Image (tube, rainbow, N blue to C red):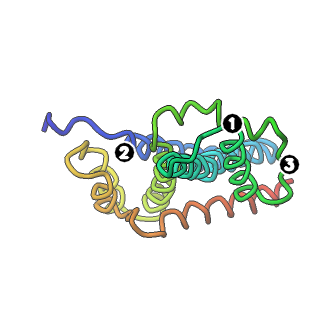
Amino acid sequence: PFQYYNYTIFVAEVASTFNEQLLARTLIEQAASREDKASIINHEIDSIRATIVRQTMFAEFEKKVHAMAEAGEPLTVESMKSTYGGLLRDYFGPDFVIDQELELECFRIPHFYRAFYVYKYATGLSAAIALSQRVLEGGPLELDQYLGFLKAGCSKDPLELLKDAGVDMTRPEPVQTALERLGLLVQELDGLI
């Protein structure tokens, strides 16, 4: 019905990145050369890293900064740089070089001007990877469930729509599936170079 035609940003993110997953897999399978295949896989690895890892780090930064403000702590350049720098070290490890300029990155990210939505990118891509894997490895039922997700618009809560499509975002499995996909891509790239 018309009243359900609209959709949330999260549902749109799942649908668009689902298609990107199908395209990436097709391009990898049909790559004309090892170099082309390696390039496509590298792009896919970087996309997953930037979306799942980095956007999760952004969400954690937002949470920490808002908690500081709610606790009455002043949000200074130094406190925000320190918080962001700590997250960079936590997320990227001790071998990652963090210079002073990189700690300033938190001030130029426009996502932070609209609070608490960047997590939708990470969870949306995780759901899309899990959904695309279900459709590619499944049969007509899995495809029908995904098409039902698309047709549903905003007739239900997004988490319920995804459950109906076979992906339960209240459980760790979709994120684990996405990270396993990332690991497989890294292994495949390693074998090509």
Picture coordinates of residue 126, whole percent (x, y): 51, 56
33 lies above or below 157: above
Looking at the image, residue 144 lies above or below residue 112? below
Give x and y (percent) for residue 157: 26, 52
The amino acid at mark 2 is Val
Q: Is residue 50 visible?
A: yes
Out of 53 and 17, give the one closest to the viewer. Answer: 53
Q: What is the crowding at mark 1: few (fewer than 14 residues within 10 Å), some, or many (at least 20)?
A: few
Separation of marks 3 and 2 at Cα, in angstroms = 36 Å
Q: Nearer the viewer, residue 177 or 27?
A: 177
* Residue mark closest to the camera, 2 vs 1: 1
Location of mark 2 (residue): 11
**For the residue marked with disc 3, what is the amino acid?**
Val
| Front label number (1 vs 3) | 1
In screen coordinates, is 79 left or right of 151? right
Q: Which mark is residue 85?
A: none
Query: Which badge, 3 or 2, is on the more N-terminal residue?
Result: 2
| Mark 1: secondary structure | helix
Q: Which element is circle 3 on? A: loop
Q: Which residue is mark 3?
A: 97
Mark 3 burial class by Cα count in 10 Å: few <14, some 14-19, many 20+: few
Q: Quadrant of residue 143?
A: bottom left
Report the side of 133 relative to 58 (left or right): left
**Residue identified by numbered label 1:** 77
What is the CA distance from the residue labelled 1 to the residue labelled 3?
Answer: 20 Å
Compared across the picture, whether 167 is left or right of 7 comes to right
Where in the figure is residue 132, as x and y percent of width and height?
Answer: 47, 55
Q: Tags 2 and 1 in contact by the CB under 8 Å rule?
A: no
Viewer-side label of 3, 2: 3
Q: Quadrant of the N terminus?
A: top left
Above or below, 170 relative to 115? below
